[in-house]
Amino acid sequence: MARTLAMFTDTSLCIGCRACQVACKQWNELGLELPEWTGTYQNHTHFTDKTFRLVRFIEEPKPSGDLAWLLMSDVCKHCADAGCLNACPTGAIYRTQFGTVNINQDVCNGCRYCVSACPFGVVSFNENTGTAKKCTFCNDRIHNGLGPACAKACPTESIQFGFRDELVGRAQKRVETLKAMGFKDAQLYGADSSGFLGGLNAFFLLLSKPSTYGLPENPKLPQKNIFVDSLLSIGSALLVGIGALVAFRQRGTGGEA
Amino acid sequence: MGGLLQSAHWPFLIDVYFFLGGLAGGAFVIATAALIVDSVRYRDVSRVGYYLALVALVPCPVILIVDLGVPVRFMNMVMTFNPRSPMSMGAWALLGFSAAAFLAALLTLLEDLGKARNLSRPKTVIGVVGGFLGFFLAAYPGVLLGATARPLWINAHTLGALFLAVGASSGAAAMALVLAALSRRSGDGIARLATTTVLAVVIQLVAMIGFVWSVRASGSAPALNALALITSGPYSMLFWGGAIVAGSVLPILLGLVGLMRPSVGLTAVTSVLVLVGGFLVKTLIMAAGQV
């Protein structure tokens, strides 16, 4: 595998211009969607089959009575332990040599298991193609050394693209700087390879706790359940099987043979 | 309920598939149990079970294929073998179990037509191998749901056990119902199926308690909200009245009465209740988990 590529989204630099969201739409030729009322400046409420980059707008009340104005350009995390990739029964979802996770549109048969298996609600079903869709880190661009459209379009370098190890080092320094400036809740989300989901290949610098942004604090790989759930199923199978054998073997119940 | 999470929004047809697949697996296993204990005495039980398993299976692949976004690509499911995906394993189990169910029904048919005298030995081999696959087919949908990010399902741990027990109870109940309709009098086979049904319903009830308990114990707010849809929200009438009281508790009580005074009418009523209850259990868990 080549050196892992990653995206670091520093939300402290985001100005909410949505250039990334537009660039993503343009490059990936994602179709029109009607806007919806979300209660904030954000559109849409969640990822869709036509929105792979989504700037979240959060107005968080502060103890002082002010509103904190939190912005976060959200994207597929390309998890090192990816729920969607594990769930896929056709092999349509695969990992590239750069560590990103893609959906092969010619293989996907639209079972939608990945949609329910994503811990971040990223994977979306497209009714027209009948397949699952999500961000590819602009697979065509990164294979030609161009970098994802969103990162290229970002005017504040809030979205940075590069080698994962380099970006993590840069992100850690940035957190320290922000903490020194008084942003006491500044923290990285998904940067730690030994943390949840084996680390996220799209990781974030947040200015508040993850749940403020609607992110799960400690997302769990759904497939972690399979072992215990299967053991309990086997236990249930043993009880049912023994029960049936006993019910038929036992003497004296029932009428005539 | 799931915050930023998305849902596959699998339609009602998938609930029907989960129910039929479980019923087929359950009926097949119970038919095999009867065959192993006494192939002559319980001939009718195993016959009905094997036929029923095949009949219940027929709509299953059709439902699954129709539900796909690109139905013509259904074969892609069996182009890979992914042990980390319960859906992949389920596709293989459905394929393998269908072959076993077909062979078992075929051998039974050969016996019934008088083409062969006694095929209980090959039937036992197919029955045991197919029985494992049948159990797998009944349980895997629950494990599949547990391996999603949906809050209600990821925090539950007994869904596979529960779905398997529902498959067994509905399989036994359906067999008893068919036998009752055919013979119209209480026989030993029907009585023992009634006992099997009650045992399976007890296991089902325990797994259901385990489901509610594990979701509660998780303390996850979205999971508790989804659970509340079943226990106190819009589905609570169907859950408490249908799935629990009419579909589980009442059948256990009626089954105990039946142990004392066997009656074909009583068994038929109990079987219908168990079938409806089992279907409600799966449907409600699907509905509440996907909101």
Image (cartoon, coloured by chain):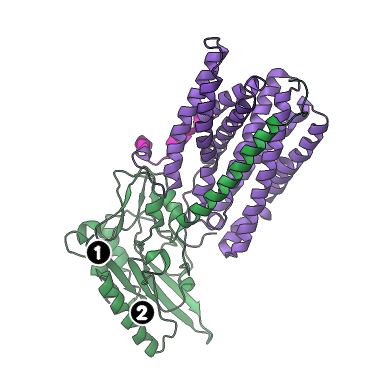
Chain colours: A green, B purple
Which chain does the residue under circle 2 lie in? Answer: A
Q: Position of residue B160 (x, y in %)?
A: 56, 47
Q: Residue furthest left?
A: A144
Please tell me whether residue A252 is drawn above or below residue B214 in the rendered image: above
User: Of B84 and B246, which appears nearest the observer?
Assistant: B84
Place residue B191 in its image quadrant.
Answer: top right
Q: Is residue B221 above or below residue A223?
A: below
Residue at 67 percent of width and 49 percent of height: B206
**Quadrant in which the N terminus of chain B is drawn:** bottom right
Q: Residues within 10 Å of mark 1 (few under 14, many from 20)?
A: many
Q: Residue at x 35, y 73 (%)?
A: A16
Left-right relation of A194 to B190: left
- Give percent across and percent down for residue B261: 83, 29
**Residue lying furthest top:** B114
Query: Mark 2: which secondary structure?
Result: helix
Question: The residue under label 2 is which amino acid type?
Answer: Ser
Which label's residue is closer to the chain start, 1 or 2? 2
Residue B242: percent from left, percent from top: 70, 43
Residue A1, x across and y down, in percent: 23, 59
Classed neighbour count for the residue bearing mark 2: other residues with Cα under 10 Å, few (<14), some (14–19), many (≥20): some
On the picture, is A204 further left or further right than B25?
Answer: left
The residues bearing labels 1 and 2 have C-alpha atoms spaced at a distance of 20 Å
Magenta region's main secondary structure? helix
Q: Is residue B64 magenta?
A: yes
Labelled pair 1, 2 in contact (Cβ < 8 Å): no
Q: Is B63 part of what is drawn in magenta?
A: yes
Judging depth in this view, the residue of B16 and A227 nearest the camera is A227
Residue topped by disc 2: A12
Magenta range: B59-75
Asked which quadrant contains residue B74, the reply is top left
Whether residue B30 can be seen here: yes
Residue B235 visible (yes or no)? no
